[in-house]
Image (spheres, helix red, strand yellow):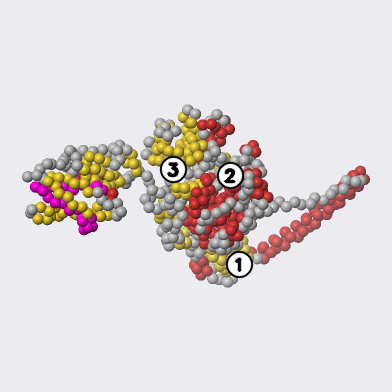
C-alpha cells in the first residue's frame, strides 16, 4: 500500500495502526495539501459481505458527526477491491498508551478527558448513533490535550431494535456493558457504562473486572460488584467516584439516562469535587401490583339477582328524575324573581371594571383614589420582557366585568426585564462555557474560528463581553478555536539566484530562512547552490529552508579558503582567525556560530607566506601556514 494513490488524490505514506477490521495509514491529500488518516478494510475480509456491510455502516454513521471531540470523516471510497475511509489525522497518542506510560492520571486530568469524551458521545447520541466500543484504545489525545473519539467501526443508528449482532460480541470485553456481555439490547446507556469503566481505569490505572479468559471477564460484568475506586486511589474525589459507580451500574435504569445528564455532573465536579451530589438512578418506574382474585362460583344465581336488581333500579331512577324536575322548576322561579329584585335594588351601585393592563401603577393608584369605588391593591411584582417597570401585567377582576361597588382590584406589576451580567468565558472549554450560560439563563451560539495559539475547543472571546448586562434569554456569541489552520506552501527553485534575492523570496511565500552555509564553488560568489528541501515540494507554512551559498573559486595568487570544523560539545562558539605576516598580525575573521554551521569556510587574501591562528572562544586551537605566492 505504501506509495499507492487512492482515488487519484490520497498518497499513502506509512502504516500507523490497525484493528480487527481495518489497517490505518498516514497519507497526504494532494488536492488540499494536508495529512490525513486512511482506514482500509483488511484484504482478507473484502469478500465477506457482512464485514463489507459493517464497514459501510461505519462510514455512513461517522460521516454524519461533526464535533471537536470526534475524529472527522472527510471522504469514503472504493478502488478495485480496496474499501477505505479518509479521516482527520491526529498527531498524538491513545489514552491507553498514556495510562500504560504514566499509570493512574491525576483526577483533574481524568475529569478533563472524561468531559471531552462525554461531550463527543452526547453529540453522537443526539444523532441516534451508539458507539458500542468505547475504550482507551479508541480515544486519541492530541499534543495540546484535546480528546478525539475515533473508530466508530461498530457504531449503529440506535433504533427500538438495536441488538448485539447475532450473538457475536463486538468490542473489548474489559469495557463491555452487562447487556453487551449477555448479547442483549444495547443503547446509549451502554456507551455510558463503557465510559464509566474508562474513567475507573484513568483514575486507578487498572480496569475493575479482569480474568483469565474473555468469558470470565464478561461474567464479572454481569454478576460482580467493582472495588470502589477510592479504595485503590485515595486521592479520588467523592463526586468522581459517585459518577463512576452510577455510570457502571448493572441495571440500565440505574445509570445516567443520557450523556447530557452525565456531562452536567462532570462539569459540576470541577467546582464541587468533594460533594456527593449525585442522584441515584430510577429503579422501578412501574412497581408490581397485586390483583384481587375474582370469585366465579354461583354465577347463575347471581345472574337472576342481577336482572331483578336492574328492574328495581330503573323504577327508582324514573321517580328521582320527576322529583328533581319539579324541585328545579320551583327553585328557578323563586331564584329568578329574587335576582330581578336584587338587580333593580342595586342598579345604581354597579359598574364595569376598568382595563388597567399596561398602565403605570402609580398613575392608576392616584386616579382611582375614591374608597367608595375601586381600591387598587398591588399583590406582587414579576419580571417581564413585554411590560416596562411599573406597568400593570394582570388584574383581578378582569376588565369589563360588572361588579358591585366598592370593589378591590388586585394587580400584578412588572419589574421590567430580568437583567443578567454575562460571566467571563474567555479561555474556558466551550462546553463548560455553555453550561455556565445555561445556569445564568442565557442562550448561546457557537462560532468556530482558526487560531494559531489557542487550542481547539477553547473560547477565544465572546460577545457581549464579561460583566455586560443583558436580558435573560439573550444570545451570547461564543467564538471557539478550531485550532491552527494548516496552510501548505510550494517550495520555489532557489538554485542559481543570489542570496539576497532568495532570502526575500523565502519571506514572500511564507517560509522561514534556516541555516546558511558557504562552500567553495565555481558558481559566482553569493549564488545559492543548494537548498534543504527540493523545489516544488509542498510543505507547511513557516517551514525553515536551509541554503548553501557559493563562496567563489580558489585563486592561486591572492585568495585562499580554509574550512574550520566547529566543536560539537557546545551550542555556540566564537571563531576568530588571526593572520601573521611581515606586515604584522591582523584579525581577518571573527564571528559567533551555532555548532550546526560546521564546517565554516573562511576566505583569506594575502601575499607570500602567512601564519594562520584559529581561536575558539579566544583559546588557540590550531596553527598553520599558507603560501599565497608572490
The spot of residue 151 in percent (x, y) is: 52, 42
Q: Which residue is mark 3?
A: 89
Among the two numbered marks 2 and 3 on one chain, the one whose residue lies closer to the N terminus:
3
Q: CA distance from mark 2 to mark 3?
A: 24 Å
Q: Quadrant of the C terminus?
A: top left
Q: Which residue is mark 1?
A: 407
Can residue 243 be seen from the camera position used here? Answer: yes
Which of labels 2 and 3 is toward the front? 2
The spot of residue 619 in percent (x, y) is: 22, 58
Q: Quadrant of the N terminus?
A: top left
The residue at 51%/70% (across/down) is: 366
The spot of residue 10 in percent (x, y) is: 41, 35
Q: Residue reaching furthest top?
A: 80
Q: Residues within 10 Å of mark 2 (few under 14, many from 20)?
A: some
- Dominant secondary structure of the residues highlighted in magenta in the image: strand
Q: Is residue 309 left or right of residue 236?
A: right
Queried whether the magenta region covers residue 619, the answer comes back as yes
Depicted 443 relative to depicted 550: above or below: below
Magenta-colored span:
598-620
- Element on which disc 1 rests: strand
Nearer the observer, 166 or 605: 605
- Element on which disc 2 rests: loop
Queried whether the magenta region covers residue 444, the answer comes back as no
Q: Is residue 554 left or right of residue 62?
A: left
- CB-based contact (under 8 Å), mark 1 and mark 3: no
Nearer the observer, 622 or 362: 622
Amino acid at each position: 500500500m505504501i506509495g499507492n494513490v487512492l482515488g487519484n488524490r490520497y498518497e499513502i505514506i506509512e502504516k500507523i495502526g490497525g484493528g480487527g477490521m481495518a489497517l490505518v495509514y498516514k497519507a497526504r491529500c494532494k488536492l488540499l495539501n494536508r495529512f490525513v488518516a486512511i482506514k482500509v478494510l483488511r484484504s482478507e475480509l473484502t469478500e465477506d459481505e457482512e464485514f463489507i456491510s459493517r464497514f459501510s455502516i461505519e462510514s455512513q454513521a461517522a460521516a454524519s458527526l461533526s464535533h471537536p471531540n470526534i475524529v472527522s470523516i472527510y471522504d469514503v471510497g472504493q478502488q478495485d477491491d480496496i474499501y477505505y475511509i479518509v479521516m482527520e489525522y491526529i498527531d498524538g497518542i491513545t489514552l491507553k498508551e498514556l495510562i500504560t506510560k504514566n499509570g493512574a492520571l491525576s483526577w483533574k486530568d481524568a475529569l478533563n478527558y472524561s468531559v471531552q469524551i462525554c461531550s463527543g458521545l452526547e453529540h453522537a447520541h443526539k444523532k441516534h448513533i451508539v458507539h458500542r466500543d468505547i475504550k482507551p484504545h479508541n480515544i486519541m489525545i492530541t499534543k495540546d490535550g484535546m480528546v478525539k473519539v475515533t473508530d466508530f467501526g461498530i457504531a449503529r443508528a440506535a433504533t427500538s431494535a438495536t441488538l448485539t449482532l447475532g450473538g457475536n460480541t463486538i468490542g473489548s470485553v474489559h469495557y463491555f456493558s452487562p447487556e453487551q456481555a449477555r448479547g442483549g439490547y444495547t443503547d446509549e446507556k451502554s456507551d455510558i457504562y463503557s465510559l464509566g469503566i474508562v474513567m475507573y481505569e484513568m483514575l486507578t490505572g487498572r480496569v475493575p473486572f479482569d480474568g483469565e479468559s474473555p468469558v470470565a471477564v464478561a461474567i464479572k460484568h454481569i454478576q460482580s460488584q467493582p472495588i470502589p475506586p477510592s479504595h485503590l486511589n485515595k486521592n479520588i474525589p467523592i463526586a468522581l467516584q459517585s459518577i463512576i459507580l452510577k455510570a457502571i451500574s448493572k441495571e440500565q435504569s440505574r445509570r445516567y439516562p443520557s450523556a447530557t445528564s452525565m456531562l452536567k455532573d462532570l462539569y459540576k465536579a470541577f467546582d464541587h469535587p468533594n460533594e456527593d451530589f449525585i442522584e441515584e438512578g430510577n429503579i422501578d418506574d412501574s412497581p408490581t401490583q397485586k390483583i384481587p382474585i375474582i370469585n366465579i362460583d354461583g354465577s347463575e344465581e347471581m345472574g337472576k339477582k342481577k336482572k331483578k336488581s336492574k328492574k328495581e333500579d330503573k323504577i327508582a331512577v324514573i321517580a328521582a328524575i320527576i322529583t328533581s324536575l319539579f324541585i328545579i322548576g320551583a327553585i328557578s322561579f323563586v331564584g329568578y324573581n329574587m335576582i330581578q329584585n336584587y338587580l333593580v335594588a342595586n342598579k345604581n351601585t354597579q359598574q364595569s371594571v376598568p382595563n388597567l393592563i399596561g398602565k403605570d401603577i402609580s398613575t392608576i393608584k392616584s386616579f382611582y383614589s375614591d374608597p367608595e369605588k375601586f381600591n387598587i391593591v398591588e399583590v406582587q411584582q414579576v419580571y417581564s420582557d413585554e411590560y416596562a417597570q411599573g406597568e400593570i401585567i394582570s388584574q383581578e377582576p378582569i376588565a369589563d366585568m360588572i361588579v358591585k361597588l366598592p370593589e378591590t382590584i388586585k394587580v400584578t406589576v412588572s419589574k421590567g426585564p430580568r437583567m443578567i451580567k454575562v460571566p467571563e468565558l474567555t479561555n474556558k472549554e466551550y462546553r463548560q462555557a455553555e453550561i455556565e450560560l445555561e445556569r445564568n439563563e442565557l442562550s448561546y451560539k457557537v462560532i468556530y474560528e482558526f487560531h494559531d495559539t489557542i487550542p481547539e475547543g477553547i473560547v477565544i472571546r465572546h460577545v457581549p463581553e464579561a460583566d455586560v448586562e443583558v436580558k435573560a434569554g439573550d444570545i451570547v456569541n461564543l467564538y471557539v478555536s478550531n485550532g491552527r489552520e494548516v496552510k501548505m506552501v510550494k517550495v520555489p527553485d532557489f538554485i542559481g539566484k543570489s542570496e539576497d534575492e532568495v532570502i526575500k523570496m523565502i519571506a514572500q511565500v511564507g517560509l522561514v530562512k534556516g541555516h546558511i552555509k558557504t562552500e567553495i564553488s565555481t558558481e559566482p560568489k553569493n549564488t545559492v547552490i543548494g537548498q534543504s528541501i527540493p523545489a516544488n515540494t509542498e510543505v507547511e507554512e513557516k517551514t525553515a529552508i536551509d541554503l548553501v551559498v557559493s563562496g567563489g573559486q580558489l585563486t592561486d595568487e591572492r585568495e585562499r579558503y580554509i574550512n574550520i570544523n566547529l566543536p560539537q560539545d557546545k551550542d555556540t562558539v566564537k571563531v576568530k582567525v588571526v593572520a601573521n605576516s611581515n606586515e604584522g598580525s591582523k584579525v581577518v575573521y571573527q564571528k559567533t556560530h551555532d555548532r550546526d554551521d560546521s564546517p565554516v569556510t573562511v576566505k583569506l587574501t594575502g601575499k607570500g607566506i602567512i601564519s594562520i591562528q584559529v581561536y575558539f572562544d579566544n583559546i588557540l586551537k590550531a596553527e598553520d601556514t599558507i603560501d599565497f605566492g608572490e
